[in-house]
Image: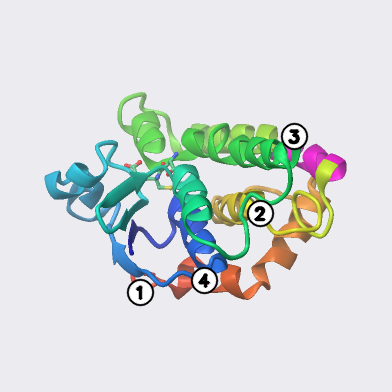
């Protein structure tokens, strides 16, 4: 299997956590999101992923983009620990918590959105910071409540799941952007605990071959 990704892309980070958790071997193929005007826009890569976004998973003849689709595919195709454990209602709740981060927050803070804010809408750094702080606050305030309602040893109950694979990269991004996390004690504690897990630690951006200092 091959995973096209970028070291500090949150969506790639999710997929790496999932692959490690499922104990699947894969080759990591870096796509530099800034170099050469963004290698994700090059034609060869766009043939794999027409959105020009990372990650993309290649498993034999199967090519999949969208990190949540990748995680569900890995779970259905490969045995081992489940990213979506439990019954239908548990699994729906895990998907909902995952989407709260991967679909309601991450697209608003993505590189191409930030490039549009500064390049086309001419927002200055202060306005961009306010944009990021606003969307992080909305998403993390509601995730804090979800953790009260559904959290246990992990984001949902007492088993690791796709929701945990989604939380870690989003908090990593928040730290990168200097977002104040003091209003979210449960989220912070969960993040610190998850970072210790070996399959999460190995997926950390700083551990990837394309990591930059
Ligand atoms: N919903 C997608 C999001 C993918 C995505 O936004 N990837 C970002 C990095 S986290 C990207 O490739 N950005 C490149 C760009 O904005 O040009 C997923 O979960 O895979």
Spatial CA span between label 2 and label 3: 18 Å
Residue 194 coordinates in the image, percent (x, y) = 69, 64
Q: Mark 3 — residue?
A: 142
Q: Is residue 143 above or below residue 45?
A: above
Spatial CA span between label 4 and label 1: 19 Å
Q: Mark 2 — residue?
A: 161
Classed neighbour count for the residue bearing mark 1: other residues with Cα under 10 Å, few (<14), some (14–19), many (≥20): few
Whether label 4 lies within 8 Å of ligand 1 gets the answer no
Q: Pick whichever of labels 3 and 4 is earlier in the sequence.
A: 4
Q: Mark 4 — residue?
A: 23
Looking at the image, which residue sits at the far top? 121
Spatial CA span between label 4 and label 2: 14 Å
Residue 35 coordinates in the image, percent (x, y) = 23, 56
Q: Pick whichever of labels 4 and 2 is earlier in the sequence.
A: 4
Q: Nearer the viewer, residue 136 or 28?
A: 28
Q: In this view, does 32 lie to the left or right of 76?
A: left
Give the residue at x 68% y 73%: 196
């Amino acid at each position: 299997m091959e995973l096209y990704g970028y070291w500090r892309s949150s969506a790639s980070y999710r997929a790496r956590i999932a692959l490690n958790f499922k104990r699947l071997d894969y080759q990591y193929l870096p796509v530099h999101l800034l170099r050469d005007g963004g290698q994700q826009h090059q034609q060869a890569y766009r043939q794999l992923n027409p959105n020009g976004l990372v990650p993309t998973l290649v498993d034999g003849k199967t090519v999949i983009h969208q990190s949540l689709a990748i995680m569900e595919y890995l779970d259905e195709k490969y045995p081992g620990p489940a990213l979506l454990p439990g019954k239908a209602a548990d699994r729906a709740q895990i998907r909902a918590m995952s989407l709260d981060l991967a679909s309601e927050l991450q697209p608003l803070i993505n590189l191409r959105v930030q490039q549009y804010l500064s390049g086309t809408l001419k927002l200055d750094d202060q306005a961009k910071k306010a944009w990021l702080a606003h969307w992080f606050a909305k998403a993390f305030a509601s995730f804090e409540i979800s953790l009260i309602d559904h959290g246990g040893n992990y984001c949902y109950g007492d088993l690791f799941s796709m929701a945990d694979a989604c939380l870690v990269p989003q908090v990593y991004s928040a730290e990168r952007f200097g977002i104040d996390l003091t209003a979210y004690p449960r989220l912070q504690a969960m993040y610190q605990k998850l970072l210790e897990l070996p399959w999460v630690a190995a997926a950390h951006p700083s551990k990837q071959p394309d990591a930059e200092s």
